[in-house]
Image (cartoon, rainbow, N blue to C red):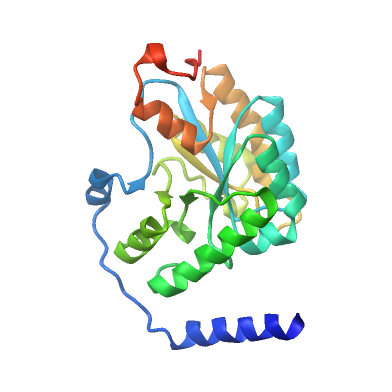
């Protein structure tokens, strides 16, 4: 088993070194938005937002976040890396069991900026396999590392059946830098509007997480202002409204 794993890593390393770096075409956000192939936010008057977390799971911080989400009856979407999913499978399984959505955020968290289609495909496939092994199903959502997007990234993801999910431009508090919790909360509050996709991170290299400290004030802020936090898929479903309201199986939130 050890020899097979070593051989796999050698092959992957060789491909990453030999594969030519790709500088793919990049179009303005507006062009991608028109096609519906990349989603930054949704257009709705209903007070719905999607809180998303990147880079986890984390053995300490993620369970604390899950406790708070349960307390406020809020759902979130976790864009996980394959390597951390395999490190903390029980945490990932808890996310899924408690009704949160799981998305693909590549295996190693390498920047996609110069990645070829083959390299990205390998990262996505390996993460899919890790997630399916733990929760029994593959994700349908993908968030590029660092929010980088270009034709190669989008085409590769769509060929694999992923929706490419980014975030509202005014809802990135840069919490991965671990600023004070009050600053994170203030950033979310200032930009808050229906249909927002909020990006946060449940993984960092610090011993404490200001994101965790910010979560209860954020969830209370949403509740006090009549907002409901839902998964990305529910946000997309409710804002696209494929059915007339009278036939909609999901009740309207207050």
Residue at horizontal 69 percent and vertical 83 percent from the top: 4
Residue 193 visible, this orientation: no
Residue 202 visible, this orientation: yes
Considering depth in this image, is 122 or 73 the residue closer to the camera? 122
- State the image coordinates of residue 249 (x, y, percent, origin top left): 47, 19
Tally the numbered discs: 0
Task: Assign the N terminus to one quadrant of the image.
Answer: bottom right
Image-quadrant location for residue 246: top left
Considering depth in this image, is 55 or 205 the residue closer to the camera? 55
Q: Is residue 70 left or right of residue 102?
A: right
- State the image coordinates of residue 86 (x, y, percent, origin top left): 70, 61
Considering depth in this image, is 15 or 204 the residue closer to the camera? 15
Image-quadrant location for residue 11: bottom right
- State the image coordinates of residue 161 (x, y, percent, origin top left): 41, 53
Above-or-below relation of 19 to 73: below
Residue at horizontal 48 percent and vertical 48 percent from the top: 140
Residue at horizontal 50 percent and vertical 35 percent from the top: 50
Q: Is residue 64 left or right of residue 163?
A: right
Q: Is residue 115 left or right of residue 254?
A: left
């Amino acid at each position: 088993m050890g020899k097979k794993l070593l051989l796999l890593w050698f092959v992957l390393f060789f491909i990453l070194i030999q594969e030519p770096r790709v500088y793919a075409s990049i179009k303005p956000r507006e062009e991608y938005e028109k096609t519906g192939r990349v989603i930054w936010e949704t257009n709705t008057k209903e007070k719905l937002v999607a809180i998303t977390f990147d880079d986890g799971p984390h053995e300490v911080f993620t369970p604390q976040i899950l406790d708070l989400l349960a307390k406020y009856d809020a759902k979130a979407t976790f864009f996980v890396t394959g390597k951390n999913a395999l490190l903390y499978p029980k945490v990932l399984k808890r996310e899924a069991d408690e009704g949160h959505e799981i998305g693909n955020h590549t295996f190693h968290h390498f920047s996609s900026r110069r990645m070829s289609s083959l390299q990205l495909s390998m990262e996505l496939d390996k993460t899919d396999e890790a997630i399916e092994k733990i929760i029994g199903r593959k994700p349908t959502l993908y968030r590029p590392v660092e929010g980088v997007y270009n034709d190669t990234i989008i085409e590769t993801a769509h060929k694999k059946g992923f929706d490419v999910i980014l975030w509202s431009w005014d809802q990135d508090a840069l919490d991965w830098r671990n600023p004070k919790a009050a600053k994170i909360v203030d950033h979310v509050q200032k930009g808050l509007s229906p249909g927002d996709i909020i990006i946060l991170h449940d993984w960092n290299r610090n011993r404490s997480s200001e994101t965790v400290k910010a979560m209860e004030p954020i969830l209370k802020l949403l509740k006090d202002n009549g907002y409901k936090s839902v998964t990305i898929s529910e946000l997309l479903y409710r804002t696209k409204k494929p059915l007339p309201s009278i036939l909609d199986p999901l009740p309207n939130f207050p």
